[in-house]
Amino acid sequence: MKVLVFGGTGFIGNRVLRKLLDRGHDVAAFDINPALPAYDQDFQSRVQILRGDITLMDDVVEAMLTVKPDHVLNLAYLMGAGDPHLGVRLNVLGMDNCFEAARLCGIQRVVYASSLTVYGEQLNFGERPVVEADFRHGKGLYAASKIYNEHQAEWYSAAYGMQITGLRAAHVTGWDKVRGSTDHVKCITEPARGKPVEFPFRDAMRLPIHVSDVAEIFSRLVEDDASRHPVYNSGGNGISMGDLAALVTRFVPDSQITFAQETGGRDASSIWLMDNSRWLDEYDYPLPAFEHRVLEMINEVRQDAGLPLIAGESVHA
Ligand SMILES: NC(=O)c1ccc[n+]([C@@H]2O[C@H](COP(=O)([O-])OP(=O)(O)OC[C@H]3O[C@@H](n4cnc5c(N)ncnc54)[C@H](O)[C@@H]3O)[C@@H](O)[C@H]2O)c1
């Protein structure tokens, strides 16, 4: 199968490329930044990389006609709350260009990234896991764009019989993440480098999921010709920043993680309880234990910095 990944050189995208290549697929990446990270040099020659701008319909159609993919994945996005002019062009028009070009080129299967932000704060739901049918309370440009993307996908699927599927990804974490939510990342990577780090609230809640796991979910969705549902929750590991700091400190005992305030972050926190049984029932990929992923991230950072690695046994001590 041939897969074209828009935003393919990004944080999640480059991991998806590797996974699809490992499973024997032909893979092409379309990105405004055509450079893969240095750690991907081993497979760069096996990926067709096209430099292009998803906000330009001509670029998108040309890429689809050049690559002739069987399936498409769209990860190109403006992370966080950015400039609305660029946000609308990239996040709304870019998604439309992707769906419309796929339709024009006869490509039925498109997968795209939605986000846990569509739900808004956990406070809207009390202490229960959200399910995909829950009301989308998300506010702000990023969440509104993701909600709008879901409507776009629904419309194209209904009007043209396309198989468009979205993943509501939680807080994706990984040692080299630099855009979007990064406090849960820095809480792991800064102590791993031996650096002090401070956060506003110990009780702020996060729902981290490791980037390898999100890449696995996207890969499985895009390999499939169709999914049973229009959107899936990724799930993740609900944890407070304080408990994450404690977990990191178990691995790196001299961690210097401080909080400006003990409380005040919980009510403003986005979703930390997310039901992913829809995903598990259909694709059977339970998430690996989060603490193993944390140790992996610590050691990736330490290897990069030339520091001694931390042994896994200490987790269970
Ligand atoms: N990282 C997270 O925590 C997270 C959580 C939920 C959902 N998501 C979603 O997953 C998707 C991928 O996120 P990511 O973390 O890999 O982000 P990223 O910023 O690392 O990747 C986005 C990619 O899009 C590319 N891009 C930007 N403008 C472009 C343009 N005009 N044309 C073509 N390419 C362009 C960037 O160069 C980048 O490679 C996004 O839709 C994001 O909203 C991410």
Image (cartoon, rainbow, N blue to C red):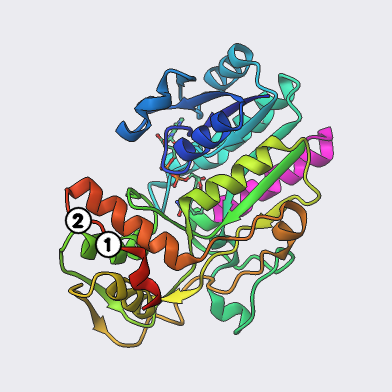
Q: Is 277 or 202 nearer to us in this picture?
A: 277
Q: Position of residue 304 (x, y in %)?
A: 23, 46
Main SS of the magenta part reads: helix
> Which stretch is magenta?
144-162
* Distance Cα–Cα, label 1 vs label 2: 7 Å
Q: Is 136 or 278 nearer to us in this picture?
A: 278
- Disc 2 is placed on an element classified as loop
Farthest top residue in view:
66
- Disc 1 is placed on an element classified as loop
The mark found on residue 310 in the picture is: 1
Say whether residue 157 is magenta.
yes
- Is 15 on the left-hand or right-hand side of 286? left
Asked where in the image residue 14 lies, by quadrant, the reply is top left
> Quadrant of the image for the N terminus?
top right
- Residue at 71%, 55% in the rendered image: 284
Asked where in the image residue 234 lies, by quadrant, the reply is bottom right
- Tag 1 near tag 2, CB within 8 Å: yes
Q: Position of residue 108 (x, y in %)?
A: 76, 29
- Residue at 42%, 39% in the rendered image: 86
The mark found on residue 158 in the picture is: none
From the viewer's perspective, is residue 8 above or below residue 184?
above
- Residue at 70%, 53% in the rendered image: 231
The three-letter amino acid code for the residue at tag 2 is Pro
- Is 146 on the left-hand or right-hand side of 193? right
> Quadrant of the image for the C terminus?
bottom left
Q: Is 316 or 24 nearer to us in this picture?
A: 316
- Is 56 on the left-hand or right-hand side of 44? right
- Is 82 on the left-hand or right-hand side of 272? left
Q: Position of residue 13 (x, y in %)?
A: 48, 38
Residue receiving disc 2: 308
The three-letter amino acid code for the residue at tag 1 is Ile
